[in-house]
Image (cartoon, rainbow, N blue to C red):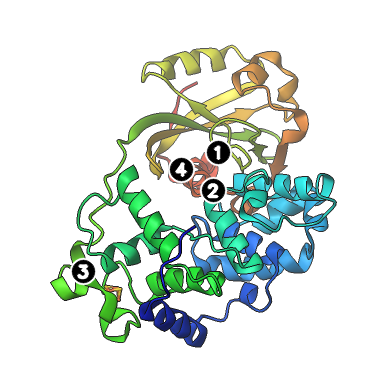
Amino acid sequence: MNAEPRSAWVDALVSWYRAHARPFPWRNKVDPYYTWVCEVMSQQTILSVVLPRFEAFIAKLPTVHDLAQCPEPVLRELWAGLGYYARARNLQKGACYIRDVLSCNFPTTYEGWLAVPGCGPYTASVIASICFREPVACVDGNVIRVVSRLLALENDVWSTRGLTRIQEFSNRSIPHEAPGDYNQAVMELGATVCRKQNPRCDVCPVAVRCEARKLDIVEKCPPVKPRPESTDVPLLGLVLSDATTGKIGLLTRRTGFLAGTVGFPLLRLKEAEEMSEVLRRFRTVRDVRQVEFAGEFGHTITRHRIRGRVLTITVSTTEFHLDPQLSDFLGTPRADDWQWLPQGEVSGGLSSSLDSKIWKAGVPSQFQEPRRLTLF
Ligand code: SF4
């Protein structure tokens, strides 16, 4: 990698970071395990949510070995509230690789981290630069915003060409003697000063290097990211209620949509007409006593626009997974994938906001306004 002669703006940026870095617990000591866990937790989750959970996670699983052998229910509990549980499973897969293949020795290079299952270029560059002083530049949303403003990029930022340009600029700028501080400094600047809305240019340590500021086009850099086309997903959420106890069935989803989360059985419908097919099949199932249409909900996950409907289904036994018709209908989950909770405990057992919306619509009718339609 060809580094440019060290620039004054890089010195100013790194000095600013050293004086102003927020005191996060993973910054207390340089430890690849801490850095790795916090990076994975921070993907798609805001820091105020991550902070208390990071400390609880590290207290319970202080080493990569502890993480590798953590039972799934404990891992799930430690991850509650962070969302996207698949990240936790990938983290554990990576921990198993480090335990089994590397005898609990962490990789010490960017390439080595890339070989860890579930670890992508961004996470590998963060860990390699902060913990092993390898000069590999990280590029995330904050870095893209800061660099596009430094270079006054008002067009063509989000294409492969545009992102390559930002990566190459970052690669040239990263100082070999302080790669970790540089990477964290750019990200910190983007998070606290060079913000998307209302950037604080008056206190910015790199204002003299900022082309967008000189040209008065800060608000135009970077340009708005083109949204990927969204897809409509018709979905049916099933709230199963035991006729005898009133307990509600929650399922650990092993595969498919929201794999790894705990919630209600979901049926992805291909066509609107399939609703009648769903009902027709339910009518034939021995263990189903009653089906009610409980309501509708909308939800967006990345580019999936979910149009959901909720059915509350009263079943005569919680052993219905033995009924081949219904098991087939629900995607053949295993018996131990189910848990039956009293209604007051359901909210606490859900791991996604989509499930919370289903539950809001689907609380069994004796506890709700009489606005339901009994289908049979
Ligand atoms: Fe961002 Fe303003 Fe600093 Fe430029 S001067 S990098 S726009 S905060």
Sequence-wise first label, 4 or 1: 1
Sequence-wise first label, 3 or 4: 3
Circle 1 or circle 2, nearest the eye: 1
Q: Secondary structure at mark 4?
A: helix
Residue type highlighted by circle 1: Leu
Mark 4 highlights which residue? Answer: 361
Residue type highlighted by circle 3: Val
Say whether residue 85 is visible. no
Q: Nearer the viewer, residue 274 or 252?
A: 252
Say whether residue 203 is visible. yes
Task: Please name the residue shown 32% across and 82% down the image.
Answer: 204
Cα distance, mark 3 to mark 4? 44 Å
Ligand 1 placement by image quarter: bottom left
- How many residues crowd mark 4 within 10 Å: few (<14), some (14–19), many (20+)? many
Q: Quick check: marks 1 and 2 in contact, CB under 8 Å?
A: yes
Q: Left or right? Give the position of 173 relative to 346.
A: left
Mark 3 highlights which residue? Answer: 218
Circle 3 or circle 4, nearest the eye: 3
